[in-house]
């Protein structure tokens, strides 16, 4: 299901990050591929991992369209940190004391990621997911 085009950069970033985190949550194969990517230098595994991340980048670009981040922010670095955090939490769910064992645990982390996006890029429109 495609949502209407995002109205703000924050909204586009939130949607993309939520989709990525949801894919990690719901797709054990994606988890394994990205986990293998971190654990090995095998060319095939690295290629699979890069394919997954390239799909995320395309999704973010499509969701973002012509929207731009607020001035003065290093959006590229911020987005990479958010993606790395989502990936790390999904691949090592007990890391840092945040266990992802229940739906409530996953929703808690989704809300936290959303709050970070909102703090970095500003408040979203009323069509926000959370």
Image: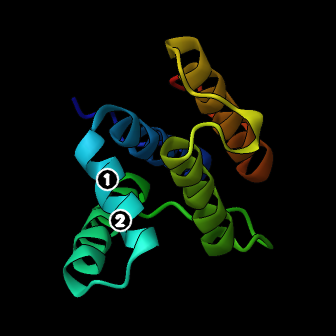
Q: Position of residue 74 (x, y in %)?
A: 72, 74
| Number of numbered markers | 2
**Residue 103 vertical placement versus 77 (above, below):** above
Q: Residue at x 37, y 70 (%)?
A: 37
Image check: 46 left or right of 126? Answer: left
Q: Position of residue 108 (x, y in %)?
A: 65, 22
Q: Residue at x 25, y 34 (%)?
A: 2
Query: Where's the C terminus, which quadrant?
Result: top right
Residue 93 visible at all = yes
Q: Nearer the viewer, residue 96 or 80?
A: 96
Q: Position of residue 53 (x, y in %)?
A: 35, 66
Q: Residue at x 61, y 47 (%)?
A: 10
Q: Nearer the viewer, residue 74 or 36?
A: 36
Q: CA distance from mark 1 to mark 2?
A: 6 Å
Image check: 22 left or right of 117? Answer: left
Contact check, label 1 and label 2, Cβ < 8 Å:
yes
The residue singled out by tag 2 in the image is 36
């Amino acid at each position: 299901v495609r949502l209407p085009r995002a109205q703000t950069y924050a909204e586009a970033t939130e949607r993309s990050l939520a989709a990525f985190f949801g894919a990690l949550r719901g797709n054990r194969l994606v988890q394994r591929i990205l986990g293998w990517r971190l654990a090995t230098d095998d060319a095939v595994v690295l290629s699979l991992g890069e394919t997954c991340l390239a799909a995320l980048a395309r999704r973010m670009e499509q969701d973002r369209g012509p929207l731009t981040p607020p001035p003065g922010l290093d959006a590229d670095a911020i987005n990479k940190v958010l993606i790395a955090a989502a990936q790390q939490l999904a691949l090592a769910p007990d890391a840092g004391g945040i266990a992802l064992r229940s739906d409530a645990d996953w929703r808690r982390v989704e809300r936290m990621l959303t709050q970070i996006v909102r703090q970095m890029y500003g408040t979203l429109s009323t069509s926000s997911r959370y």
